[in-house]
Image (cartoon, grey):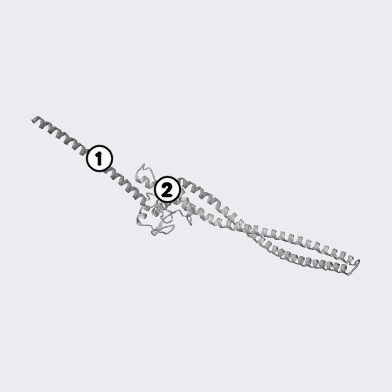
Amino acid sequence: MATKKVANDEEVAKTTSKTAKKTTAKKTETKKSTAKKSAEEEVAKKAVSKKNQPEVIETHIEEQNGESAEDITIAQKLLSLYNLQQIMSQIDRIRVIRGELPDEIRDLEDAHEGMQTRINKYNEDIDNLNAKIAGENTKTQEAIAAIKRYEEQQDNVRNNREYESLSKEIEFQKLEIQVAEKHKVKFQAEIAAKAEEIETFKEKLKEYEEILEQKKSELDDIIADTEKEEKELLAKADVLKVKVDERLLTAFERIRHNARNGLAIVQIERDACGGCFSTIPPQRQLDIRLHKKIIVCEACGRIFIDKQLVEEQAENQAE
């Protein structure tokens, strides 16, 4: 009896031990599942948070020397972009001064060519009118010859019927001569009018030639004065472009192309964007002052640079 009791106690102990192990394993598995779920939720939250952030152009930098190295690099890139903007603005001003003249010259050249084409067309019309006058002269001569022939035939008629028939032919030929004369007068009047207009066109053509010569001379002088300066500015711009990331440079050039005034990087003026004058929130201004990443205006897409950063550069250059 005692032996059975001992056996039962051992069996109960084994069962209890197994149950305890299963419970422990289950708890461990539950903890792992909970931890995994929490990690997934954290990742999802970060993804949603990142998605809801304002759109910015970020330049990722390897943290070789910690946060300060990243700040210096971003600041240098912003300053390089700002300096590039200043140079490109100078080039734009040069091209604006020079750019109006080529447009004027092209317009004058088109007007000159159009006037010359019109003169040539009027000369062709005059040639055609002269050919028509020659045709009418031929008709007149033929009619005169026919009248002379019919009058000779009238002397040899045998009856009144033949005489009347020849008289009608003579009258018809005389009418042909009158019509030809009217046509000749009309054509000559058209020739005179076109010749007068040609003289007017030639005077205008001469004016165009004089203005063209003057404008081209002005353009040559401006090119001579600005070509050297423009080449030097372009060389400086190429040096600065090397210091900027290709992706950032592409964005800079795209913004410049789309901006009406050619400004791609601007400062904040009176709590507003220096390009489109949209109000910038205080937190956004703080992010710009920290220059930890490249930030653009949500309204116009221009890149922001901290005003203090520009002033510090100016002070360093002055020293």
In terms of depth relative to the viewer, which is nearer, 297 or 309?
A: 297
| Alpha carbons under labels 2 and 1: distance apart | 51 Å
In terms of depth relative to the viewer, which is nearer, 228 or 79?
A: 79
Residue 116 x %, y %: 67, 58
In terms of depth relative to the viewer, which is nearer, 34 or 222?
A: 34
**Residue under the image location 57 percent in, 55 percent down:** 222
- Res. 170 mark: none
Tag 2 residue: 77
Residue, far left: 1
Q: Earlier in the sequence, mark 2 or mark 1?
A: 1
Q: Amino acid at mark 2?
A: Lys
Q: Amino acid at mark 1?
A: Glu
Residue 265 x %, y %: 44, 53
In terms of depth relative to the viewer, which is nearer, 146 or 57?
A: 146
Residue 317 x %, y %: 43, 51
The 10 Å Cα crowd at callout 2, few under 14, some 14 to 19, many 20 or more, is: many
To which quarter of the image does residue 19 belong? top left
Tag 1 residue: 29
**Residue under the image location 77 percent in, 67 percent down:** 182
Q: Is residue 319 left or right of residue 130?
A: left
Quadrant holding the N terminus: top left
Q: Nearer the viewer, mark 2 or mark 1?
A: 1
Kind of element beneath mark 2: helix
**Residue under the image location 8 percent in, 30 percent down:** 2
Kind of element beneath mark 1: helix
